Amino acid sequence: MTTATSCQLDSPSLRFGASAISPMHIDGQRVSTEWVQLRIGVVNARIESSVSGLAEEYSALYSGYPTLHDNSHVCVRVERGRSRYTMGRRFIVSSNGERMFSVKRIEELLPHVEWALNWEVVRRLDTYLQLHAGVMERNGAGIVFPAAPGSGKTTLCAGLLSRGWRFLSDEFALIDTDGMVQPYPKALCIKEGSFTVMEHLGLPMISPRRYRKGQKGRVAYVNPLAMGVDAIGKACRLRHVVFPMFENGAKPALSSMSRGETGFALSRLSFNLRQKGARGMDILTRTLRGATCHRLVSGNIDATCDLLEELLGKQNHA
């Protein structure tokens, strides 16, 4: 599979590190599998694949991340198989013995591996309060961007990353029992409509014509470490909650929210608040204590980032 190994970072520092070849049995047959184990913030991830080159491609996507040799929280497996309905040839993405995705084209494979990893984080890391949100940090202050898909939170995180903010996630805010936001710094998944914005921001994308992700169409990925070894943040206290909504051409504007209104909105963007019950509400309440809460209309990325930096500057001097 020659195309699977053609993925390159625009950065000259690309290296393939944590891959190995070992025997694995699939449907009773002995096959060779490639695997890579990485520490992605608080998530220990293992990707196994009988599709030649995929583990190397995944390792290239996460060039510079710590590699592991111990047990992983989450394991995603990729193999060749057939559709349950048409019996056509497919690539099968599974985890914990459960078939999660079946895709036809090789350019769909890596995005679905990332998708499967996200769902396994939701299922297996339920000790954290999980919010669908981007998370950035600057000067020790955490800012969370909770939003439904299509609200522009990934582009917003990319804009702040290009200005030296530290990246924790563009997918999940994982909040522990002490109210600290923990890092899950997966590569930023960029939709085709934002490719020119990434070029404007100077963020190197991995093969922007290489991948497709369901209804999102073409996507590319940005490794945050391409911006420097300090680009990924550590666990931090949440100081700001900002709900972004992208409106093309709109002048960026912030409006204040009460903590009660914020808590209700966050409950609708949580993957596990209902299951956690009173414990989850306690975490949420303590997390919001002392945080400022806003809605953000986001238009031009530069003006939006200026506005957010002004917000943090005012708070730091308050």
Image (cartoon, grey):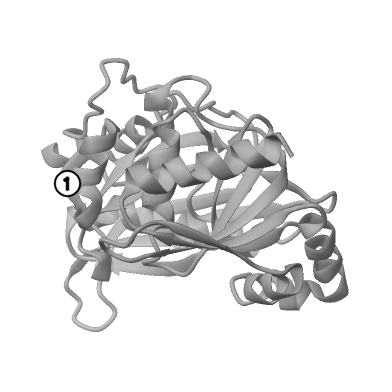
Q: Who's the residue at 32% across and 15% down the image?
A: 13
Instruction: Find residue 24 and report its horizontal and vertical position in percent.
Output: 43, 45
Residue 287 makes an appearance in the image? yes
- Of all residues shown, which one is farthest toward the top? 13
Considering the image in quadrants, where does the N terminus appear?
A: top left
Asked which quadrant contains residue 68, the reply is top right
Instruction: Find residue 239 and report its horizontal and vertical position in percent.
Output: 71, 47
Number of labelled discs?
1
Asked which quadrant contains residue 33, the reply is top left
Q: Who's the residue at 83% across and 53% down the image?
A: 177
Q: Who's the residue at 44% across and 20% down the image?
A: 228
Residue 31 makes an appearance in the image? no
Q: Amino acid at mark 1?
A: Arg
247 relative to 64, above or below: below
232 relative to 221, above or below: above
Instruction: Find residue 135 and report its horizontal and vertical position in percent.
Output: 56, 48
Q: Secondary structure at mark 1?
A: strand
Label 1: which residue? 210
- Nearer to the camera, 286 or 110: 286
Q: Residues within 10 Å of mark 1 (few under 14, many from 20)?
A: some
